[in-house]
């Protein structure tokens, strides 16, 4: 009974930890003659280093060769460093979008930086959309694939093409700690059960 209880506690702890993990997904898709892109999710900026405040321009833009993507309307933004991940998601040069809306959000893979609306509450939502008119993924210089950027307590995933992203698929540090603790509990319960087992009668 104790073994099953310990195992259940371990599973519950891992599930609670991974289910609360925030994440932002940037999705580039071919949509007829255009390329549409969305940025959605929530983002925990805890542990990132503030670099500077500034203003975002009125257009969204992409430079795939340096892993830079900006989305959302003009407004005040704060930039943070501390992301790790690929330096690029293609070979393309600077290109503006035709339209953009939603939250101001920027990522620079080559610099390991992310820019968020100012003010922004850590763990708050990001929801943006943009269109590259009369363009294809190929002529934007995007390389089909999935590119994951890691912050101390969160992730940003760039999907070029129809890639599925499973939330919590890569456990964050807190989840690993919970799993290790859960395995320890199961091991302790097994040892205790062995000690309490009565010897078999001859």
Image (spheres, helix red, strand yellow):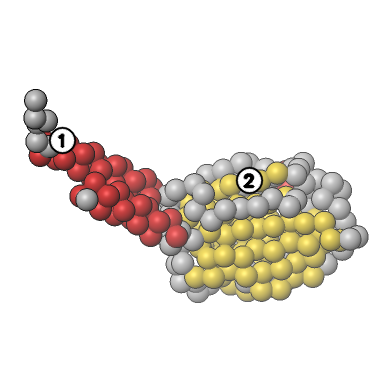
Q: Give how far across and how far down residue 28 sits, in percent.
A: 74, 56
On the question of residue 40 being in view, the answer is yes
Label 2 sits on residue: 147
Which residue is painted at 58% across and 68% down in the image? 126
Task: Look at discs 2 and 1 and give the one toward the viewer.
Answer: 1
Which residue is painted at 75% across and 44% down in the image? 144
As drawn, the residue found furthest toward the front would be: 202
Which residue is painted at 61% across and 53% down in the image? 165
Closer to the camera in the image, 198 or 94: 198
Q: Is disc 1 placed on a helix, strand or loop?
A: helix
Closer to the camera in the image, 65 or 166: 166
On the question of residue 59 being in view, the answer is no
Whether 37 is drawn above or below 175: the answer is below
Spatial distance from mark 2 to mark 1, Cα to Cα?
47 Å
Q: Quadrant of residue 106?
A: bottom right
In this rendering, would 143 be left or right of 19?
right
Q: Are marks 2 and 1 in contact (CB under 8 Å)?
A: no
Q: Quadrant of residue 135?
A: bottom right
Which residue is painted at 74% across and 61% down in the image? 37
Closer to the camera in the image, 75 or 90: 90
Closer to the camera in the image, 120 or 167: 167
User: For residue 194, which numbered disc appears in the image?
Assistant: 1
Q: Give how far across and how far down residue 67 sits, in percent.
A: 67, 47
Label 1: how many Cα within 10 Å (few below 14, some 14–19, many 20+): few
Q: Give how far across and how far down residue 85 sits, in percent.
A: 56, 43
The tag earlier along the polypeptide, 2 or 1, is 2
Label 2: how many Cα within 10 Å (few below 14, some 14–19, many 20+): some
Q: Is disc 2 placed on a helix, strand or loop?
A: strand
User: For residue 96, which numbered disc appears in the image?
Assistant: none
In this rendering, would 61 be left or right of 11?
right
């Amino acid at each position: 009974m104790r073994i099953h209880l310990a195992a259940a506690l371990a599973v519950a702890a891992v599930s609670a930890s991974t289910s609360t993990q925030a994440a932002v997904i940037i999705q580039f898709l071919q949509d007829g003659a255009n390329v549409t892109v969305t940025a959605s999710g929530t983002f925990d900026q805890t542990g990132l280093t503030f670099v500077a405040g500034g203003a975002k321009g009125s257009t969204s833009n992409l430079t795939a060769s340096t892993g830079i993507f900006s989305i959302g309307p003009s407004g005040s933004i704060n930039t943070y460093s501390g992301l790790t991940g690929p330096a690029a998601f293609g070979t393309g040069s600077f290109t503006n979008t035709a339209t953009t809306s939603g939250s101001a959000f920027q990522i620079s893979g080559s610099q390991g930086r992310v820019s968020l609306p100012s003010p922004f509450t850590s763990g708050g939502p990001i929801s943006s959309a943009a269109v590259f008119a009369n363009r294809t993924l190929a002529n934007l210089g995007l390389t089909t694939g999935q590119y994951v950027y890691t912050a101390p307590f969160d992730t940003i995933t760039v999907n070029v093409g129809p890639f599925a992203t499973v939330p919590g698929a890569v456990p964050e540090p807190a989840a690993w700690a919970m799993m290790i603790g859960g395995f320890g509990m199961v091991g302790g319960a097994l040892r205790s059960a062995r000690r309490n087992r009565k010897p078999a009668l001859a």
